[in-house]
Amino acid sequence: MPIRRFGGHRSLVAHSQVPKLSYGYAKSNMSRSGYRVFSANSSTACTELARQITERLGVELGRSVVYQESNSETRVEVKESVRGQDIFIIQTIPRDVNTAVMELLVMAYALKTSCAKNIIGVIPYFPYSKQCKMRKRGSIVCKLLASMLSKAGLTHIITMDLHQKEIQGFFNFPVDNLRASPFLIQYIQEEIPDYRNAIIVAKSPSAAKRAQSYAERLRLGLAVMHGEAHHSESDMADGRQSPPLSRTTTGHTGLELPSNCRHHVPFPGIELPMMMAKEKPPITVVGDVGGRIAIIVDDIIDDVEDFVAAAEILKERGAYKIYIMATHGLLSAEAPRLIEESAIDEVVVTNTVPHEVQKLQCPKIKTVDVSMILAEAIRRIHNGESMAYLFRNIAVDD
């Protein structure tokens, strides 16, 4: 008869006498085996991804309350013990980005003060990722957000397709930047008829490496568009064209010099070479798209004017179907209407950002589920397993 331990005491119990655990009890017990999964969003639409992830993991979603008070302050209440556990906070980003950021920060700090062992943020779309470079007199807001998350208590982040991979250097803790390309490539192979007659299109030269990665794995051709298609970096009047100080300029010294002494002020004239105005040519397509299916790939689709303009050019060049594949479907403002009225045949995005309302407005928008890879990343991190399996067949430039 085997020896069993219960509560640290040895006892003789037959195998037939060991009680069978019901599935419901086992599921609840698994959720208390060292890690918990919470949703930091007060929006019902945004908790759908958290529900899908927990179902794949076989655990229950952690009990918490996240809401906005009457004065718009964010309040978070954790309804169970998290002491000594690994906590995963799933936060999808709706249109109200700032509220979602505050919800994540407040929940992370609440879990930190509740003595959680590790706090891992699962943020499929990282907000403010477009503001990751210095623009004139602006600031690198993405780095500020990284510092705020660290101060709030996060020790690790799982995200997907960062706008720039260099963003990982803003953090002082590990960042796992997962890729959605395997899911989008699978969609192309299974859902696009005659995809062998397709050509991968980069909407701009900066997206050429990503497009090349798709083209090589699908063994398709590559086309690149360049020219004046967007104005995200347009030069506005910011004082940089102001003329240099001349020899007779006094400058602001706080003292008024006599007129007969101004030519002795040590401000020599500055002779700079003539600056040529930055001009972009009209949109040009490098590559033959005539009689082909054009598939534009990108990481974010938000304001769709650029995509609509690109689709019109591709139609003029002979493409008979146009698809857009993107990881994060923000689809702000009038994006659904513009897509519906454009030459675009289909827009395929993942569920990293909720867009059910946009899908009701535009049937051309399709969704690919990526909860599987997020759930597997959570499981591997908690168990201390290698993450390399999730990056197999992923190119460096993807």
Image (spheres, rainbow, N blue to C red):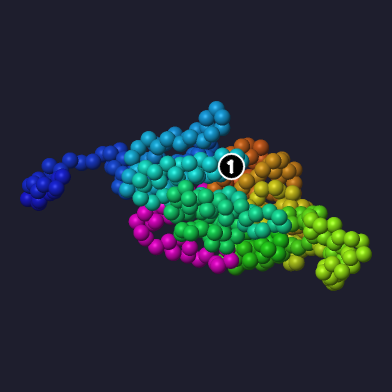
Residue sitting nearer the eye, 154 or 226: 154
Indicate the quadrant where residue 59 lies.
top left
Indicate the quadrant where residue 201 lies.
bottom right
Q: Which residue was labeled with disc 1?
A: 98
* Relative image position of residue 273 (x, y in whole percent): 85, 72
Q: Is residue 29 above or below residue 206?
A: above
* Relative image position of residue 350 (x, y in whole percent): 56, 49
* Relative image position of residue 351 (x, y in whole percent): 55, 46
Span shown in magenta: 369-398
Asked whether residue 60 is in view, the answer is yes
Q: Residue at x 65, y 54 (%)?
A: 139
Indicate the quadrant where residue 29 lies.
top left
Q: Is residue 48 above or below residue 298?
A: above
Q: Residue at x 66, y 48 (%)?
A: 302
- Asked whether, in this view, residue 68 is left or right of residue 257, the answer is left
* Relative image position of residue 383 (x, y in whole percent): 34, 56
Q: Secondary structure at mark 1?
A: helix
Residue sitting nearer the eye, 309 or 236: 236
